[in-house]
Amino acid sequence: MDNTDFYNVNLDLVCKLFEKNADGTFANASACQNFIESVLNDIEETKNEKNPQLKTVTFTNLRKLSPNKPASNEAENIDTNFDANLVGVNAARQFPYIWDHVYVFEFVCEGVQSQLYIVNQNVKYMSWWHDLSFFSEKLFVAHSQRNDGMKRYLAYLITDNSFKNTGVRAEFAQSNPFHTVSIFNNRNGIKDETFEVHYIYTVNETGREYSNLENWTRALVVVPQEAADNVSDISEAKKSKVA
């Protein structure tokens, strides 16, 4: 597999979400809200089939799980305030390809305090799969032990082009029992209503071409050879349709 099969995450765009106004409020709160709602409404497993009404959220905060700033021109936007007590910190520290690559969106949805953990893939999948698998399990354990009434979503941004084929994706989703949705999202009869694991395929996505989430994945993907064509403006990621 050559280097063109692996894509990076547009960290400049991610860091722009951290921008704050003079009064300390998030300058791009509406974009953060839009991203959260895109994940909740456009991934099959998060949809409520009995009540198809779209979920709306109130965005409250965005944090990076580790105190280190990413390699981005916009990294100064990220607060250096670090909460070592945030659920998942101790788990993430154990895995080099997870630590430094987790962003936590905090919000209220249907009256429930919630968190969305976004983990971006930063190396080829074969190097990453071990950390991905066991971080999911350990985050679930930490979540269960905290028992604070918070609902937590964990979503992986998968940027490896080897998963462009839906059949390969299905095989991937079943390959590691610690992180597969079959364990956490009630496909084997085991379900915790307060914890879900999902995958966001950011390369050659199909089936959601006209969704907000698809716009976000196109904005978040960085093609190394085509950097000049990457979406860098948040407003472009909020289009209702892909051009």
Image (spheres, rainbow, N blue to C red):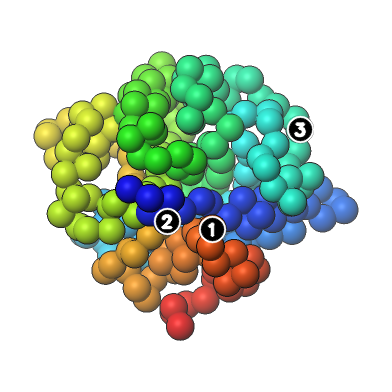
Whole-angstrom CA distance, mark 2 to mark 3, is: 34 Å
Q: Residue 205 location in percent, x, y? A: 33, 64
Q: Looking at the image, is mark 1 or mark 2 earlier in the sequence? A: 2
Q: Amino acid at mark 3?
A: Thr
On residue 41, the disc is none
On residue 224, the disc is 1
On residue 80, the disc is 3
Q: Amino acid at mark 1?
A: Pro
> Of all residues shown, which one is farthest toward the right?
22
Residue 183 placement, left or right of 17: left
Q: Nearer the viewer, residue 208 or 204?
A: 204
Whole-angstrom CA distance, mark 1 to mark 2, is: 8 Å
Whole-angstrom CA distance, mark 1 to mark 3, is: 28 Å
The quadrant in which residue 142 appears is top left
Q: Residue 242 location in percent, x, y? A: 44, 78
Residue 163 placement, left or right of 188: right
Q: Amino acid at mark 2?
A: Thr
Question: What residue lies at 68% left-to-right and 31% top-to-bottom?
Answer: 68
Residue 236 vertical position relative to residue 126 in the rendered view, above or below: below
Residue 167 placement, left or right of 79: left
Residue 41 vertical position relative to residue 212 in the rendered view, above or below: above
Q: Nearer the viewer, residue 137 or 112?
A: 137
Inspect this view and state whether residue 151 appears.
no
Residue 218 vertical position relative to residue 82 in the rendered view, above or below: below
Inspect this view and state whether residue 150 appears.
yes
The residue carrying pointer 3 sits among few (fewer than 14), some (14 to 19) or many (20 or more) residues within 10 Å by Cα, namely: few
The mark lying in front, picked from 2 and 3, is: 2
Q: Nearer the viewer, residue 54 or 125?
A: 125
